[in-house]
Image (cartoon, rainbow, N blue to C red):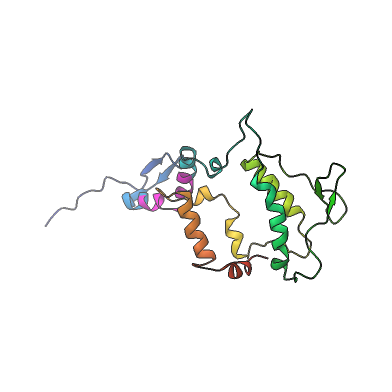
Amino acid sequence: MAKKRLSEFTASSTRSCNTCELEVKIGLGGESNWTTHTESVAHRKNKAAKNSTAKSKLTSFFIKKLPGSSSRSSPLTVAPSLLQDLMPSFSGSSQDGPSSAPPVVNTPDDEPMAINSDGSPLPPPPGAGAVSSSSLLSELERVSVSLPLSIPEGTEMDVLAQFSGNPILELEAGQDVWEMADRTLNGAVGYNKMVEDITKIIR
């Protein structure tokens, strides 16, 4: 009769996880319990967070204005009028109906200025040539403030609500940000969708 080989693991066996910064109790299960831990969602999120510091961030795509560089017209200054032109199609109103875009008035120095529904002016767009992640967020905030009240806020049940978190935490080992975004967008919106199909999920 062959003798059973004794396990190197005991009921109190633990292993240190540097990624999660804790002692993982692996007990008599040993390697299989350790594998279960390393494949857990919490461990993968911690690993992704640690790896994100080593990887370049998505915001590095945006170019910051260098001191002394010539100022150029920013493509961001075009965005509000483009978005305002598209708003009626999102809200379902016709082109001939009343505009949902905020009214625009000319200021003394002949620069148009958008006005909120309460009469207060919207903040000005970011300066020319200042293309950065913070100015993009400022521009997005400025445009979203001008949305009419007829456009409801998103809820957690919306298809696009899954994009409200930090995309870096969703990365898997060896995966680029664009790969995760592509997979997630295709899962939420679908493949080969037309603009008309996508606008149906945007409220």
Residue that appears at 88% across and 43% down? 108
In the rendered image, the residue lying farthest to the left is 1
Count all numbered tags in the image, as a single digit: 0
Nearer to me, 92 or 34: 92
Percent position (x, y) of residue 17?
Answer: 41, 41
Residue that appears at 64% across and 62% down? 156
Q: Main secondary structure of the magenta part?
A: helix
Q: Does residue 126 lie above or below 70 as drawn? A: below
Q: Is residue 64 left or right of residue 190?
A: right
Percent position (x, y) of residue 2?
Answer: 13, 55
Residue that appears at 70% across and 45% down? 138
Highlighted magenta segment, given as a residue range: 35-48
The N terminus, quarter of image? bottom left
The C terminus, quarter of image? bottom right
Q: Does residue 193 lie above or below 32 as drawn? A: below
Q: Is residue 47 magenta?
A: yes
Nearer to me, 133 or 47: 133
Q: Is residue 41 visible?
A: no
Q: Does residue 113 lie above or below 67 as drawn? A: below
Q: Is residue 201 magenta?
A: no
Q: Is residue 168 visible?
A: yes
Percent position (x, y) of residue 71?
Answer: 66, 35
Nearer to me, 98 or 203: 98
Residue that appears at 54% across and 43% down? 61
Percent position (x, y) of residue 35?
Answer: 36, 51
